[in-house]
């Protein structure tokens, strides 16, 4: 049997049949590594980098190898590997983050508008919970090392360290860009007028002002 | 040209070609009216009622012809035409609701985890706004009769009456079941322990207790 | 507790972790306002405008505040708020239109190839109906002020004024760009040869010519 | 190296880890052969037959091996392999049909509300065309043996034999159940009142009555 | 033709098979915990358990807290938390598994037909790689503790321990049921006739027989 | 009734309501013909060519009118009409290919990572089969002229000529770009080190070297 160079033949077939210029580089879409600086975003994700420029290094990320920067009031470090930090997840419907919650620390109430989250506890112990919509039922549980907990898309959820050591968890998301809306930031870390926050939450005005000061908001 | 009965012929074709029992009734899926009492829910929606039992009346709904029941602390009436109230929307990616906001009334901060919302003001004037995730930017605007505003999926948003008369609005959603998570209910109308709410929001404990009392929560 | 500027810290985290140029502006995709003049369309919608250029005004539209231009033979005004008129709906799976049907007027048989429609009657009375595929069953009903009717995706449907006053309705769609194929325009308002129309519909040639003249077609 | 029975080990893993009764039979979803007589339809398709009952014969179909029954006024035979005739396509987003168009025959104007169509001509010659929405532009072309033509989802399209021999074509669809709305049947083969058809199409009443008689409609 | 009451019969079937109380109200679909023993699978996933029976424990899983059972020839333990083992992931587009690769061990070439995989290395070091389709390019890299690697949907990929200690990794998938097709099992652990394997792979017949013996296949 | 030019009126409506520059050309998305040389790929497909440049010729393809180039070791010709060869399929979820299998020829084991395949036999006879994931069950059957067989997405499958004449088949896919991963090419036609192939498959090293020579691989 022949040992003739099959790859060139295959390429020839592709070129002969294609009926389009051979200068296009995006021949397949096994993957679509995001072309972040050049390519505009679309509803389905970023434009793809030309396949010829993609190497194995693009599929690797060390973004979650160490804790992220500590966020003071929460005593928690957050590191993200969403599409902006890990362009290879573009279009693949998956991404990740890592939280390191110091003793006494919390991941405050927040939502991911664009994805569900599966949390795997790497170290320590934490309480994880979420609140369902419509019937406002609370689902929470202590999760120890090796345990998992699920937060369905778009629902308010939280975690806090329930042990004496730093709790570390790896979170995977069902989206390349799940978004993160932290309740305290949404209410108190922007210029939404205090009177609107009061109207929209029934919180006392003084409490809103206290938290706006704490989280750096104005208005 | 013939006036032979074409429909029977067409049915015969279907029957002859089908190779399956002719007792099946689900011939098409132009629509899938939810079989609410019998059919279990699936990730894509409810099972369909047999097509032969569906009539024009199923595609009609009067659920939004009048204001819903008044919700006291909000001074707002809410009526919904989601899949539970309007089974014909099942699988069609659309549903609706109606809000009637009395003078001074509000639709407090809330999210729809499963859909985006397009609001059309039928009467009066209201301020509508939402907060983006990640950068916590606020987008709000007064909307008068005939105006529309958009709330993207999963983001905290609110409305309040900015006029002297009842503001009425029709809302359409990009889902047959968008969900509704009202922030005050999620935090204060259930048995989520006060200490968790404090941890997860940085609100003062007394404020949490005050609002739990107001919204009927415990713990 | 600290009141240190949290937002800058958060931004620093994003920047530090991102590993990409900080000049990219499309940081999130809570929304993707269509970049209509510049951005090419894709199967999932238009490219997004840079988030930094988006303001609250983009989420507002007055396109349906008044009737559209009257279409003579139909005695109906049509105004649309699809993605071309309301760029903020891009990627959100929703859009809207408004019809004002004069007494005796109609919305003639048409389809929306890319979306289902939920019609809410704002004023007057109309008959709304659609025809299912495969079994050609007709579903129609009179709908008065406050009533709703559903037209599943891609099916022929129609409305006509059944009262003495102008019937006004707001329509929401399950797509940012549902399309609109008006049967009379598709058959009679273009250059499709008369002989093809006759072949494809079994209409009499004279009738095709009469309607081509009426709707401005040729051939 | 060991030749120990790996399959039993693998099954043991599945059973041990599953934490649910081992009596469930739907272990995977490589495929979901429609359980037509028993299983209710859902928005995503029919329920799956238990995997243990599925054999290679389910993935085979002879439904398109011969022409379907001749439809008189069209001089065309139609055979379908949609999910009702070919249950294995359920959930796979594909199905097929076959048309045999006698000399002088046509496939009259119709739409597939739920799928796009790719037509491959097996024999003879035909003219294939469709009409775009909104701008009503006509795209048509003669296609000979071995040629293909595309009809995008939901748009009115047609074919007619342009040669002297029977034209045969195989059509693939992007849906397991694309639907079929034949314009003449939708307008004239049901009980839609003549006056509605006239209102909705601007056809002359006598022409509507002539075609209702031809296609077996009433009203 | 019979006029026997088919609808009542069909309804009876549905009722008999449904096996769920007709009182279920399934008010929301924040989540859809799989009803594994009772509910049939659909193309979008399993039927949902009634919401009233769901507790926080359903969102927790300990399935990946310890290594799975050792698979001898691979020197690797595999534990899965797909929908069969972790019913709460149903419909959420996410799931997980854990591999423990002994020194010298491998995860042999395999695909996940229904999902992409994001691998996070918990301990040790491994080489991870995949092969693109069409151009057969190989992407591989050593990944140490804290590193991540991506395997796009449906592509052949592999891992092997490149260190002296057990390599442990957590894998997240973009599907609740990504599937697992291990190449050696697909070729050599079933009754696919040896002659077919030879035809389909160009492997020598003796080699096919050797591997069929090793992996427990026949034929 | 008026014969005034309706099309200009309709265009005026669009222009008046649009509130955006009238220079944009992508007015609808009935279709999105791929702009291959200019437009970057996105996760949902290529950018669209401006609608004004699209003609009926774009929806036609002759790519499958004749056999493709013969691939020697397989004795099979392959011609593809994926999005690169047939840009009009972009975004429509469908594409096609044609195989001509000489007597004794095969389509070796391969997968389509991005789509399911429906095979229609045009001439001759072939054996078609696939292997399910997880339980490694084999489904295969002889298919004669006019018969069809289904290969679900991502699963290993094969065909071989079981007759005395060339077997010809038309294949439709549920994706505009299903991908093609031929097992022999993935393992033996690239620079994947022999030692990795041995680790990942348990094939004997000599056999790997023999096949690397046969298929043009290195390493």
Image (tube, coloured by chain):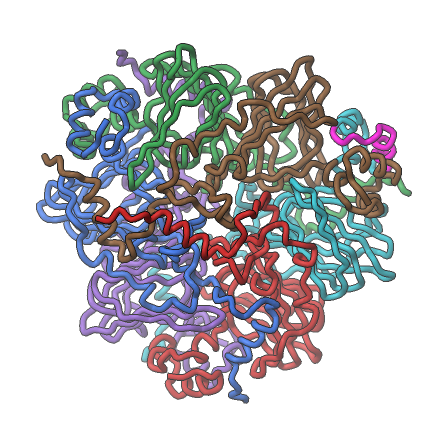
Chain colours: A cyan, B brown, C green, D blue, E red, F purple
Q: Position of residue A1 (x, y in %)?
A: 32, 80
> What is the magenta range?
A200-214
The answer to whether residue E134 shows anywhere in this view is no
B11 magenta-colored: no
- Of residues C100 and E101, the one nearer the viewer is C100
* Residue drawn at (27%, 12%) of the image: F2
* Residue drawn at (85%, 62%) of the image: A165
- Of residues D197 and E182, the one nearer the viewer is D197
A209 magenta-colored: yes
Picture quadrant where residue D203 is located: top left
Q: Quadrant of the N terminus of chain B?
A: top left
Q: Quadrant of the C terminus of chain B?
A: top right
Q: Position of residue B153 (x, y in %)?
A: 60, 38
Q: Chief secondary structure of the magenta span?
A: helix
Q: In the image, B154: left or right of B43?
A: right
Note whether E54 is above or below B77 in the view shown.
below
* Residue drawn at (30%, 72%) of the image: F106
Q: Position of residue D17 (x, y in %)?
A: 61, 70
Picture quadrant where residue C27 is located: top right
Note whether B218 is above or below D202 in the view shown.
below
Q: Position of residue E85 (x, y in %)?
A: 59, 65
- Of residues C178 and A65, the one nearer the viewer is C178
* Residue drawn at (29%, 56%) of the image: B21
């Amino acid at each position: 049997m022949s040992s003739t160079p099959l790859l060139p033949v295959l390429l020839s077939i592709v070129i002969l049949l294609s009926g389009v210029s051979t200068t296009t580089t995006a021949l397949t879409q096994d993957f679509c590594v995001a072309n972040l600086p050049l390519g505009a975003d679309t509803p389905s994700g970023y434009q793809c980098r030309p396949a010829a420029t993609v190497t194995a290094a693009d599929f690797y990320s060390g973004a979650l190898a160490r804790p992220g920067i500590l966020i003071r009031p929460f005593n928690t470090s957050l590191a993200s590997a969403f599409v902006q930090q890990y362009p290879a997840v573009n279009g693949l419907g998956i991404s990740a983050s890592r939280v390191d919650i110091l003793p006494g620390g919390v991941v405050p109430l927040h939502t991911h508008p664009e994805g569900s989250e599966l949390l795997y506890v790497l170290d320590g112990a934490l309480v994880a919970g979420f609140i369902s919509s419509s019937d406002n039922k609370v689902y929470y549980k202590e999760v120890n090392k090796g345990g998992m907990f699920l937060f369905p898309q778009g629902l308010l959820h939280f975690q806090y360290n329930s042990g004496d050591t730093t709790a570390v968890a790896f979170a995977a998301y069902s989206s390349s860009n799940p978004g993160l809306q932290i309740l305290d930031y949404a209410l108190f870390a922007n210029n939404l007028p205090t009177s609107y926050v009061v109207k929209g939450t029934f919180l006392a005005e003084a409490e809103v002002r206290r938290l706006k000061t704490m989280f750096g908001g104005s208005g």
